[in-house]
Amino acid sequence: MRETVTVVGDHNPALLKYFDCTRSGPRSAFDGNVVYQFEIMEYAQLEISVMFGILINHPVLITECACNPVQSRSKIAELLFESYGVPSVAFGVDAAFSYKYNQQFGICSKDGLAICSGFNTSHVIPFLNGEPVYEACCRTNVGGYHVTDYLKQLLSLKYPHHMSKLTWEKVEDLKMEHCYIAPDYASEVRLFQKGDKKAEEKTRCWQLPWTPTPVEEAPSEEEIARKAALKEKQGQRLREMAEAKRFNRINDLENEIRDLDMLLQRLRHVAENDIPSILGKTVYTSKQDVESALVKATQSLRKAKGEPVESVEKMDPSSTEKYNLINVPDEMLTPDQNPERYLEELRAKHRDLSEKVEQRKKLKTNGGHSNGNHNGSGGGVGRGERLNSSQRERMRLLTTAAFDRGKGEDTFGTKDEDWQLYKLMSRDNDDDDDDKPDPDEAELARISSRLQEIDPTFIFKSEAGSSSAAEAPRFRPLTKEDFQIILGVERFRCPEILFNPNLIGIEQAGLDEMAGISIRRSEASKGVEERITNSILLTGGSCLFPGMSERLEAGIRMIRPCGTPIKIVKASDPILDAWRGASAYAAAMQFPHQTFSRMDYYEKGEDWLRSYQLRYTI
C-alpha cells in the first residue's frame, strides 16, 4: 500500500526514518509570485493554523504582487473565509508597504518611485500623494532566483568536476558575498579581457576543501643504519657465493688442464697413424685443437686467479681481401658499396613516393581538377570537371531510367531487366584503373619494408599514428589550484540580467528602462515629474548588490531630460521593510475599516474583489 506524505516547510529529521526526502517531488504554490496551486497553499496555511489554533478570529492582511489576478485573490479569500473562519481580509502590495514604512522615517517622500527587485520578479511602482499608481507600474519576470540560477550554470560549465560542491545554497552565498553591478557593463568586460592588474584585483577565489598528497618523510638515522647493515649482510653473502663459484671454477680448469697435458703427452709418444684413433674417443679432431684448448684453459685459469693475461693477436691472412674498400674515397664508392649514401637515397625516394601517392588520393577524393578549378567540397563532380567512365555510366543509366519509353504512360519497371538498373547504379563503380594495382604504392611498400630493416629510426606513417593514438595520458597529481573556484567576469555578468534580461533569453525591459516607462506613464505636470525622480526607493533582496544605485541613476539620467534631479535611496532594510510596514499597518486603529468582511464576501461574491483596493494612507 502506497501512502503519500506531504511535508510543509523544513523537513523533520524524524521523517527520514520512514521515507527518503531526497527522492520526493518538491512543489511550490507560486508561479513567480502569483499563487496558482491552492491545494499546496492550503497545506501551508493549515500548518500555520495548527500552531495558533484552527479558527482565526482576527483580521488577516495578505501581501500580494502588483496587479494580482482576481482569480488568485478570490481563491485565497475563499480559503480563508470557508476553511479557517477569518472574519475579514485585506490585500496589499509588499513594495507599497516598504515604501510607506520608509516614508515614516523621512527616507522617501509621498511622491516617488518604488523599485522592488525580489526573488522571482521585479516591479517599479510610482507613488502620488502617498498612494501607488498601479496603472503606471511595470513588471519583469527577473529576480534574485534568476541571478543565482545563472551563476550556478556558469560555474557548473566552468568547473564540471566540482558540480557536487556548487549547491544552490552555496551559490546563493557566493552571489550575495561577491557579485556586484558594473557601472558600465561593456567597459567592465573589456577590462577582464585585457587581464591586467585591475582585473586581478576584482577576481575572487573560493578555496574548496583540499587534502595535499602525503609526502614521504625522510628515513631516520636508525632506519638508514638498519638498511645499510642489511645491505652489507646481503653483499657479504653474495661475495661468499661468488668466491665459492670461483673456487669451483679454478678446480674445474686445473682438472681440465691436467687432462689436456696428459693427452698431449700421450700424443707425443705415439705414431701419427695412431693419433686419430686416440682422438676419436674425445671431442677434438687434431693435435692443434688440443693445444689450442690447453692455451684457452690456461688463460681462463690465470684470469680466474686474478693474474694478468697476455693478449695474443692473430692476424687474419684474408683481412686485406675482406676489407678491400678501406682505401677507396667515399665519392668513388657505388651506392651498393656506401651504406650511408644508399640509406639517404632510400629516404629521398620514400619521401617522393609518399607525396605522390598522397596527392593522388586527394585528387581521387576531391574528384580531380580541370582547367585549374579544384573541387575541395567533396567527392561530387563540379562545374568544368571531366567525368570519368563510371560517372558517365551512372549518368547514362539515370537518363535511361528517366526516359519515358511508353506513349503517354510510364512503363518503367514492368520488365524484369528494368530492375537491373538499380543494381548497376548502386554498385560502387570506381574508375577503370582502380582495379589495377598501383605500381607506386607497391614500390612505396617495398621501400618502407626495406627501410624498416636497415634503419632502426624509421617509423612508418600508419605505425606513428597508431602509437600516438594509443599513448596513454600522463597522470598529474591534483594540486591546490585544482580545488579553487575563480569568480571573475561572473561577479558582474550574473546581476547584469536585472538590467539586460535578454542575456538569459527573456525579452523584457530592465530596471532602468522600467523606471523611465513608469515615470513617463505617471507624468501629469513638470513638478510631479521632478518630485518622482527626486525620491526613488530601492527595496527587495536583489537591490543589495553594490553599485545598484549608481547604475540606476546613470540609466535613468540617460532616459530623462538633461538637468532632471534624480535621487536614489536604499531602504533601511530592503528584505524586511515590507513585513515591518505591513505589521505597522495591521496594528493601526483604522486597519479594520480597510478590510472586507466575510459577510461582504457572501453577499457581493468574488466579483467585488475586482474593484477592491487598499488605501495605504490611513
Image: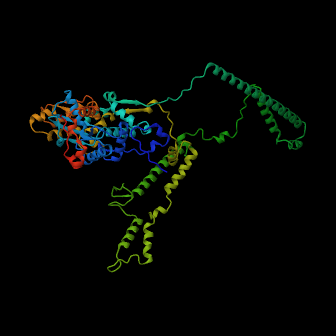
Taking the spot 14% from the left edge, 31% from the top edge, the residue there is 565
Q: Is residue 500 visible?
A: no
Residue farthest along the top direction in this orientation: 221
The image quarter containing residue 117 is top left
- Give residue 209's position: percent from left, percent from top: 46, 30
Position of the C terminus by quadrant: top left
Q: Residue at x 41, y 66 (%)?
A: 389
Side of 618 relative to 573 (left or right): left
| Residue 22, placed above or below residue 477 | below
Give the quadrant of residue 314.
Answer: top right
Count of residue discs = 0
Q: Nearer the viewer, residue 312 or 411?
A: 411
- State which quadrant residue 426 falls in: bottom left
Give coordinates of residue 381: x percent, y percent: 36, 61
Q: Examine the rendered structure and indicate whether residue 438 appears above or below residue 292.
A: below
Q: Residue at x 26, y 47 (%)?
A: 74
32 and 273: which is toward the camera = 32
Res. 199 visible in picture? yes
Decide: is 421 above or below 225: below
Task: Name the spot of residue 463 as percent of width and height, x first.
Answer: 52, 47
Residue 301: image location, x then y, percent: 78, 29
Left or right of 106 on screen, residue 458 = right
Q: Nearer the viewer, residue 405 or 216?
A: 216
Residue furthest bottom in the image: 407
Instruction: State how the image is colored.
Output: rainbow
Nearer to the camera, 299 or 418: 418
